[in-house]
Amino acid sequence: MSTSLSCLRVAAFSFIAIFTGACSQNSGQQSPDNRPAASEDEGGPQFVYNGPPPATPDIQNFKVSVWDNLVLENRCGACHIEGEQAPFFVDNLDVNDAYAETNQGDLVRLDAPALSRLVTKVAEGHNCWTDQPQVCADVITNYIEAWAASSGAKGNVIVLTAPAEKTVSDSRSFPAESDRFAEIIHTPYLSQHCSRCHSEDASDAQQPYFAGKDVDAAYVAARSKINLDVPENSRFYQRLASESHYCWSTCSADASAMLQAIRTFRDGIDPTEINPQLIVSNAITFSDGVVVSAGGRIESNVIALYEFKTDDPDVAYDTSGIDPPLNLMMTGDVSKLSTWGIRLNGGKAQGPTSSSAKLNKLIKATGEYSIEAWVVPANVTQEGPARIVSYSGGNDIRNFTLGQTLYNYDFMNRSSVTDANGMITLSTPTANEVLQATLQHVVLSFEPVEGRKIYVNGSEVVTEDPAGGGNLNDWDDSFALVLGQETSGEYGWLGSVRMLAIHNRALTAEHAKTNYDVGVGEKRFMLFGISHLVNMPDAYIGVVAQAFDEYSYLFDAPFFISLDQDAVPVSPISIEGIRIGMNGREVSIGQAYANVSETISADNYSPEGVTLSNLGTLVPIDKGADLDEFFLTFDQISGVSFNRPAEQLAEVPAPSDVEVTAPVIGLRNFAEINHTLSAMTGVAMNDPDVVATFEAVKQQLPTAENVDGFLAAHQMGITQLAVKYCNKLVSDSSMRAEFFSGFNFSANASTAFDTVGRAQIVDPLLQVLVANDVNVGSGETANLQSQPLPDDTRLELNRLIDAMTACGGSCPAGATANTVTAVCAAALGSALMLIQ
């Protein structure tokens, strides 16, 4: 028994909208699909159609989206044509006959493209044109989705199918402590034989780090490689027994030793017996769930797509279906994520220049494009900018780059109004700290009128490009697409990429929001059978679940539904206190549905179901997505109750007398910084230019004196304010003459900063900072212990002068004043001023 939930029912059942998005739409501007047929691949196989023209608009849509791409002999055209092997869905004599053939049975399902027989047959290994059947399946799915979108077909139907009935069973779970793992598996085997690669400090480090020195971290990384239920299915054993992977003696002996170690570890874990008093649903595993299509995305102008679904450790496949495929070779420390994605930890994924050239060709044809990515930056300290995605030829020449600088996303684009390096860079606002070390959806778009825009998590964060629009005529087709580094191997970025799509149309704010709402990664409807608990046939409680990251599952929006379309509650069904169970026991955290209290009756029930909660929650992964068994428990359902014991709160120990040493230094806050810079330079705080700068950076300045709260963003704001004060000082001839007494501002920078000139600039700055030697009486001088040595400060400022005047006799006009301004800002914007 099954039921269908289509996107047309969004209004009635809101959780579908969250996870399946709207009905299929076009990408970017509302224009015809400009995907080239596969036969247009220069140098590739060609096919010229000379048969009758398509008889209807839908047949034309079928031809452009599906038939043109599969008719080639290296796809399906060698067999599935008239006179060869049925079905003749790529009949090359008459596309109208091919269309009629395609519409027979479930060969193509426009309502659920991923369930089309064309897709499932190839996914099973039938005549895939790559060595990865999943890649071919994804490509054909994209072709069918494009046909559905262009035809206005009802798409993204979720077919809820009853899972196999399973009762909750006793199960072994990994112990919380790593002691036995260290003693039985890690120390004698993993650390000794696998640490040359699978440890953090290895010369050729490769994740996962299950052999690292940190045993607790290694334990977490190793769990997915150990099968407690069937030790013979453990990857640690299979890699040695079946794949002869880096055996240390003979593979048969090593595999046998590893298997025995896993069995010994498993036998020391007592099975968790389900509490017989609990009221429980049927059990289900993640793989038993119904896949939620990522339909509803704006993607009909995608020309390169990376969803990272395959487990190939060396290649990230382009599944856009646009030839030639721009597959990326992974080198260095790059690993695949089980949640679909890659983790870049010092390595890169780079495509060849020959197939990268399709980006140049197809983007220049429209004059606009978008880069869309789901990313997880490893930290907020990366600079360079660190290269997340780049289409470039070296450190200082590119077509485009998505990068990171601290809390900012950076967008470099080569156009008629920027240079060959894509400068000036467009960045997210520093003060807003938009970039965070968490999963984020980032869209960079460019179009010739308004130029660049940046969207993060569905919101437009940069609305104006200072460079403006322009054309892309100067793009270079000899560059390569690369993730995680520059093509030179420099400017590395640390983090994960969960999805990457390159469009040859500029996505709008609405499109960015739509794609953000669809989300990323594999999602499944998990149906927990409860017909044995309620008076209603085929009754289930469903949730939308996904492996959120390597460590947790995300459960969202539980709902009650019957898969019998004609069923209604015979009597009211009350449900209270839902909890998530895993591997024989209720999980200890993430019980967001414990307060659910709902009654389903004939009055409020509909075949689309009844939402029980709009909350989402995270629960920890135990054995892994393939092995964890889930169930639900209830405090009360249909009049049957579980007398749940009151939770025992842990006693809070009496606080110990800990002597806390307060810092002897503090920071000046935003108002004090403004007053201090004004007092030091003599520039009035109410100067209009100073006021404008202060108001712009005020929220970026420290608000408290606690030195532990200082951030890099604070220093950026301080520097901007210091530059403004120093610029006003140096620009006023009378003020600068008084402050920098005797310095010749009209001299060329190559001669102005001799020994005397440097002293005339540096000494007054040290004096206002109280960083010079001070008179302590009796004709003696000394420096304050809270300040650095004057000679050290002079050395740093003189090094800055050297760098600013390296141009020598060719220094441009104004270089002298600019150098003084820079030295002034470096000194007055430093910790010498900030710390009090």
Image (cartoon, rainbow, N blue to C red):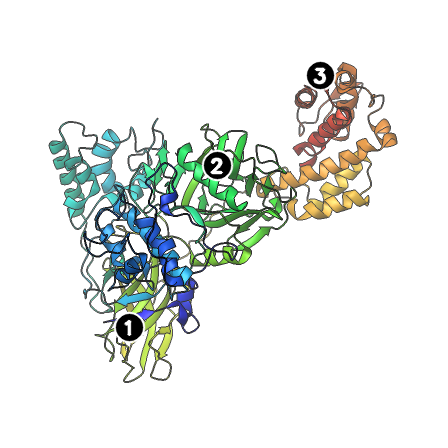
* Mark 3 residue crowding within 10 angstroms, few (<14) / some (14–19) / many (20+): few
For label 2, the crowd category at 10 Å Cα-Cα, with few meaning under 14, some 14 to 19 and many 20 or more, is many
Q: Secondary structure at mark 2?
A: strand
Residue 309, compared with residue 490, is above or below; it is below
**Mark 3 → mark 1, Cα distance in angstroms:** 85 Å
**Residue located beneath label 1 in the image:** 643
Query: Type of residue at label 3?
Result: Gly
- Give percent across and percent down for residue 340: 35, 48
Is residue 238 placed above or below 19 in the rendered structure?
above
Single out the mark in the foreground, 2 or 3. 2
Query: Which mark sits nearer the N-terminus, 3 or 1?
Result: 1
User: Disc 2 marks which residue?
Assistant: 391
**Mark 3 falls on what kind of element?**
helix
The quadrant of the picture occupied by the C terminus is: top right
Q: Is residue 34 left or right of residue 608?
A: right
Q: Which residue is mark 3?
A: 808
Whether tag 1 and tag 2 are in contact, CB under 8 A, the answer is no
- The answer to whether one can see residue 98 in this image is yes
521 relative position to 432: left or right = left
Q: Earlier in the sequence, mark 2 or mark 3?
A: 2
Q: Amino acid at mark 2?
A: Tyr
Which amino acid type is shown beneath numbered disc 1?
Asn
Q: What number of labels is visible?
A: 3
The quadrant the N terminus occupies is bottom left
Q: Nearer the viewer, residue 525 or 502?
A: 502
Q: Position of residue 256 (x, y in %)?
A: 12, 36
Relative placement, left or right, of 242 versus 581 is left
Q: Are marks 2 and 3 in contact (CB under 8 Å)?
A: no
